[in-house]
Amino acid sequence: MQQRTPGISPTYYKTIGFGLDTEQGQAYAAAKKMIDKYCGKVKNALDYGCGPGRSSRFLKASADSVLGVDVHPEAIVEAKKLPQENISYQLIQNGKLKFPVRFDLTFSGLVLLEVSNKKEISQILENLHKATTPDGTIIILTCTKAGYINDGDKWKCLLTEEEKESLKDGDSVPTGMTDSDEEFIDYYWSNSFYKNAFRENDLQLIETLYASPLEKNKKSRYVIYVCKKSKLET
């Protein structure tokens, strides 16, 4: 069996579109609604975990400028292959970020599900908090439990039915592609886990939106969390 790695490879991820005929397309459309509702036209946005740049290009429709950052050098290389005006990319080194400005909108799309431990998720939320202006908005798009255990647009869950039933926070979720032999690992984090993590990192959850599933009577596979800073800075 091919070795499993965390997350989908950047070269493959950039082939997945945002069409409304896909579950991810519906999820990003829902995220756009939240951006419009809470941010309007954004001066500058941060895309935390930009991968090959598709989410940064998505954000550009709502922001004058976008900075995409990622921990994977190969992802930054792929992102720069499709240059776009007022979108730049930066490698995250040692989990730390330093910016000359802070951002009206900080966004993280389908990133936290690739993180294997609570400490790193807390570090990411701390980075988002620091990078956001005092009255700015933090928007996080991630999977619901249904998104982990059900087959998706181009992938299939490799857990047994028993393993699906017993999922707990931090458990690995092996996943295979339906049109290639690539396999990868995501990590399950529950809604209650995220709510606690937001509180612990001084983020106030102001709205939770579940993306509309393509099929009626199916559970949503994606959720969008909208947060503000709990403590306004002076």
Image (tube, rainbow, N blue to C red):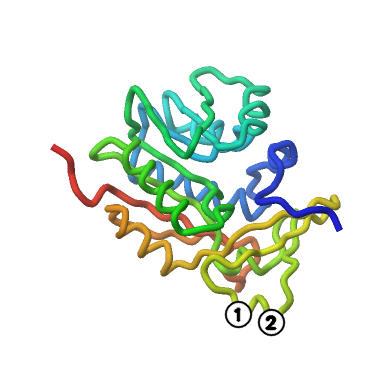
Q: Residue at x 51, y 58 (%)?
A: 117
Callout 1: 10 Å neighbours few (<14), some, many (20+)? Answer: few
The reply, left or right, for residue 65 in relation to residue 110 is: left
Q: Residue at x 61, y 48 (%)?
A: 25
Q: Quadrant of residue 166?
A: bottom right
The reply, left or right, for residue 232 in relation to residue 56 is: left
| Picture layout, residue 159 above or below residue 228 | below
Asked if the residue under mark 1 is in contact with the one under mark 2, i.e. CB atoms within 8 Å, the reply is yes
Callout 2: 10 Å neighbours few (<14), some, many (20+)? Answer: few
| Picture layout, residue 134 above or below residue 157 | above
Q: Residue at x 52, y 52 (%)?
A: 112
Which residue is disc 2 drawn over? 162
Which residue is disc 1 drawn over? 166
Looking at the rendered structure, the secondary structure element under dot 2 is helix
> Looking at the rendering, in which quadrant would you find the N terminus?
bottom right
| Whole-number angstrom distance, CA of label 2 to CA of label 1 | 6 Å
Residue 147 image offset from top left, x and y in percent: 61, 63
Amino acid at circle 1: Ser
Residue 106 image offset from top left, x and y in percent: 40, 39
Amino acid at circle 2: Glu
| Picture layout, residue 211 above or below residue 33 | below
